[in-house]
């Protein structure tokens, strides 16, 4: 069983989109949601846009890392996420990023884990600290 943490973020209709994404995760048989941090509001970093609603989830799954990323991207898409391949710093309906995967340290499929932004930004640090084991 894999234990991982997911940073959730939204700055387009955030209350609606975060709720929708959480419900999809809760209803899924692929991921078990163990804990949810409180919600934190933060200024958009690296882009112009409305403030973000952020929180962190602690989850478990039998899925591989790659399958978990694909599943989370499906949920983002279902919530209206549109990716711009030329600009990753755009407003988002829903962003679901794995920030910790088990005790792994290093790179998997281009993702650095644990996510180095954990040590840089309060919008990750505060909610992560609330539910970190």
Image (cartoon, grey):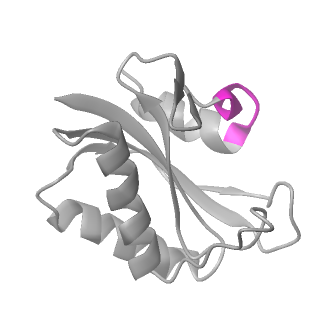
Asked if residue 111 lies left or right of residue 65, the reply is right
Q: How far across and down, in percent of the image, does residue 72 sit?
A: 38, 59
Between 14 and 109, the residue placed more toward the observer is 109
Residue 117 lies in the magenta stretch: yes
Residue 105 against residue 16 in the figure, above or below: above
Total marks in image: 0
Q: How far across and down, in percent of the image, does residue 96 sit?
A: 49, 56
Asked if residue 45 lies left or right of residue 17, the reply is right
> Residue at the location (33% across, 65% down)?
22
> Residue at the location (71% across, 38% down)?
122
Between 37 and 70, the residue placed more toward the observer is 70
> Residue at the location (28% across, 30% down)?
3
**Quarter of the image containing the C terminus?**
top left
User: What residue range appears in magenta?
Assistant: 116-122
Residue 87 lies in the magenta stretch: no
Asked if residue 48 lies left or right of residue 87, the reply is right
Name, please, the residue furthest toward the left.
Answer: 29
Q: How far across and down, in percent of the image, does residue 66 sit?
A: 36, 44
Between 110 and 74, the residue placed more toward the observer is 110
> Residue at the location (37% across, 57% down)?
70
Residue 49 against residue 37 in the figure, above or below: below
Q: How far across and down, in percent of the image, does residue 43 sit?
A: 80, 59
Name, please, the residue furthest toward the front.
Answer: 109
Asked if residue 93 lies left or right of residue 96, the reply is right
Say which quarter of the image contains residue 13.
Answer: bottom right
**Quarter of the image containing the N terminus?**
top left
Say which quarter of the image contains residue 47.
Answer: bottom right
The overriding secondary structure of the stretch rendered in magenta is: helix
């Amino acid at each position: 069983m894999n234990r991982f943490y997911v940073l959730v973020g939204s700055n387009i209709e955030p209350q609606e989109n975060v709720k929708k994404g959480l419900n999809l995760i809760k209803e899924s048989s692929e991921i078990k949601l163990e804990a949810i941090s409180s919600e934190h509001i933060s200024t958009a970093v690296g882009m112009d846009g409305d403030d973000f609603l952020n929180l962190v989830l602690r989850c478990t799954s039998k899925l591989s890392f790659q399958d978990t990323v694909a599943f989370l991207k499906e949920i983002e898409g279902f919530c209206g996420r549109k990716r711009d391949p030329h600009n990753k710093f755009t407003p988002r309906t829903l962003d679901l990023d794995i920030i910790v995967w088990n005790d792994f340290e290093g790179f998997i499929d281009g993702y650095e884990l644990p996510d180095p932004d954990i040590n840089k930004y309060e919008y990750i640090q505060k909610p992560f600290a609330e539910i970190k084991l």
